[in-house]
Amino acid sequence: MTGFAGPRVPTPEPDEAIDLCRPFLSSLPISGVSVTVISSSGTQSSLCSSDAVSARIDELQFELGEGPQWSAARSGDMVLLPDVRSGGHNDWPVFGAALRELPVAALFSVPMRMGAVTVGVATLHHTKPGQLKQEHQNTSLVIASAIAIAAVQRAMASAADDVAPESVSTPALRREVHQATGMILVHLDTTATIAYSRLQAYAFSNGRTVQAVAGDVVAGTLRFEKTFP
Amino acid sequence: MSTKTREAQLSDAFVKLADILIDDFDVVDLLHWLVEKCTEILDTQAGGLLIVDHVGLLELVASTSEEAELVEIFQLAGGYGPCLDCFRTGEAVTVGDLDAESHRWPKFSAEALRLGFRSVHATPLRVRGQIIGTMNLFSHHVGALAPTDIAVAQALANVATIGILQERNIRTSQVLSEQLQHALDSRILIEQAKGVIAATTGMDMSQAFSAMRDYARNRNLPLRQVADGVIDRRVQVGRPAPQ
């Protein structure tokens, strides 16, 4: 454990985090990928995104708590959306709508399996519609399982670190969101669950990301009052 | 016993094993069944399975009779015997006549003979060059196992190895998955608690963390437990700032 963290020095991107994304990019016909570890209680730690669009897809699924990654994590099966414009978003309507704002045509959620347990999801996307060929589906599953233990260990190491660096492409646990949740629960004299819902609701109704609003709360520039701000 | 019967028995055994391995199975039940089947097919009277545990010590996990159990335990306690030699060298050890070869393991041979065993065959459980245990068959009769029998024993032992590894793999995944959940959930509670402390005291996040950590250390409490209390507002860390 470390004491006072002091001012946060900008940290260079940890190379090894990007390494988890690389095998997907080099072996599959995709435009981008993100890798997220998900615990059995549904806590997510986002370990890498290869590009801004992948990072946003990951963030949306975190913010909304819905999307194909959650189905893949629960079922342990791949979720294949070869054409996201053609619908099929019944299980994640809000995410489906948000996806239309992004240059994403195909989305594939690949479970990271470790033995009988699913420990996370790799989310692959393509700017053009089209199904992932069977051999590429197999390859993606093999890669996802091959990186599973390393991903879990990295997520645990990051969680154990009191001042682990977080960045746009390695947001990990998105600590500011949880810090803001703690602050809001005091301001509203409520529970963490309700505080987090209020944070989410405020972000959506103002067209901002949860992370950005959380940053304002932690910085003290936004304060939730008992009457809705 | 005719070769035909043995072949039929053996193929039955493999079919049953395949069925067990693709389903949920209890590894101890599987190993018991396997060592019993092996004893039967190879016309021996008793059998036992020794498996190395997570700290590298051999453990008796299955045996067909009390006599077999005694012989195995005798070897483990004494730290020597054909099964242990098999484990150490990774090679099958066949002793066709324990009486005649008693000089190799005098005390073990005496004990085995006392329990009615005249010959023993130990087969290594091997995976990628690593030995994870041995399957041992004991006979009331003198005579080494025929090469075909040795091959059969090894084939069945290999299947047992797959079963053990599969089970261990599942167990390791479950343990790791529980550790992951604990690590991630603890961190989220700690971050939320930092937010609570920051909001109540006016501290910044790193001061809030230090205050909470000191609180936990001074009272010898786990950080996660303190964080839990802070979020539930049962625990007050730091002095509240005047509103």
Image (spheres, coloured by chain):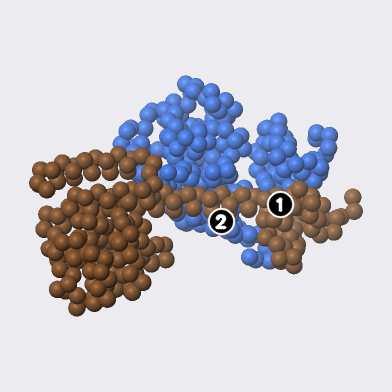
Q: Position of residue B192 (x, y in %)?
A: 70, 49
Q: Position of residue A189 (x, y in %)?
A: 81, 42
Secondary structure of residue under mark 2: helix
Q: Residues within 10 Å of mark 2 (few under 14, many from 20)?
A: many
- Residue that appears at 23% across and 72% down: B109
- Residue that appears at 23% across and 53% down: B39
Horizontal side, residue B8 vs residue A26: left or right: left
Does residue B232 appear in this view?
yes
Q: Which residue is mark 2?
A: A158
> What amino acid type should be assigned to the residue bearing mark 1?
Asp
> What amino acid type should be assigned to the residue bearing mark 2?
Ser
User: Quarter-wise, where is residue B143 in the image?
Assistant: bottom left
Colour of chain B in the image? brown
Position of residue B218 relative to residue B30, above or below, is: below
Q: Nearer the viewer, residue B207 or B86?
A: B86
User: Quarter-wise, where is residue A185 in the image?
Assistant: top right
Q: Position of residue A167 (x, y in %)?
A: 58, 51
Label 2 to label 1: alpha-carbon separation: 20 Å
